[in-house]
Image (spheres, rainbow, N blue to C red):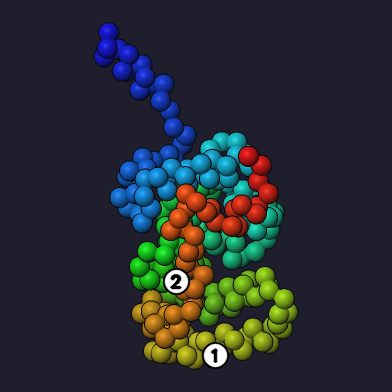
Amino acid sequence: MLAFVKRFSLKRTKHPRGYEDPQVLASETPFTVNEIEALHNLFKKLSTSIINDGLIHKEEFLLALFRNSSMQNLFADRVFYMFDRKRNGVIEFGEFVRSLSIFHPHTPEHEKSSFMFKLYDLDGTGFIQRHELKKMVGALLSETDLGLSEESIEAIVEQTMIEVDTNKDGKIDEEEWKELVAKNPSILKNMTLPYLKEVTLAFPSFVLDSEVDD
């Protein structure tokens, strides 16, 4: 009888698609089990803000990050793409935690650097080519009030390629990228969110300000 009750209880315990054991995630990320459980509450809030299916869709992701579910921006697209590790158009809980962990203060800088390199490698070739750099620079600057001209953006790209492409093959490889980051550590400034050290006390402000209903 006891065995039957246990089997029945196990069948009744269902987790949404993509759910992973907090202990497993804690062993693979800088987060503690308690922090991951807090992140799960946050994930549930985000994944039901527009479509109530336990998954974060692109519109929900954009709403949380930028307060705009229909935003058209290459940078926003790339961030979503990097979080969507399975490339199936949605972000599952495990993907959410692992991707967010890249921004944890305790995550090694080489992992942050690698993440950022892949963010710029639009075609997935293992290199940042000139046209990719220009597209990303343009996308980032479009979110500012600088209003730079096409000529100014081209000048930024040209100067960057001169300084970073040390072997003069017309593209930036990962070693050249590492050298750039080593000389300019401020490049990784936005790759660290200090409040992730106390995620149970302070959720990322961009989420709390997203106007997502409970």
At mark 1, the secondary structure is helix
Amino acid on which the number 1 mark rests in the picture: Gln
Horizontally, is 125 left or right of 202 in the view?
left
At mark 2, the secondary structure is helix
Q: Nearer the viewer, residue 141 or 27?
A: 27
On-image quarter of the C terminus: top right
- Name, please, the residue furthest toward the top: 1
Residue at (54, 77) in percent of width and height: 133
Residue at (49, 91) in percent of width and height: 162
Q: Is residue 156 above or below residue 99?
A: below
Mark 2 lies on residue: 117
Q: What percent of the width, then of the height, locates residue 198?
A: 45, 55
Horizontally, is 122 left or right of 105 in the view?
right
Mark 1 lies on residue: 159
Counting residues from the start of the chain, the first of labels 1 and 2 encountered is: 2
Amino acid on which the number 2 mark rests in the picture: Phe
On-image quarter of the N terminus: top left
Q: What percent of the width, then of the height, locates residue 87?
A: 48, 51
The quarter of the displayed image where residue 3 is located: top left
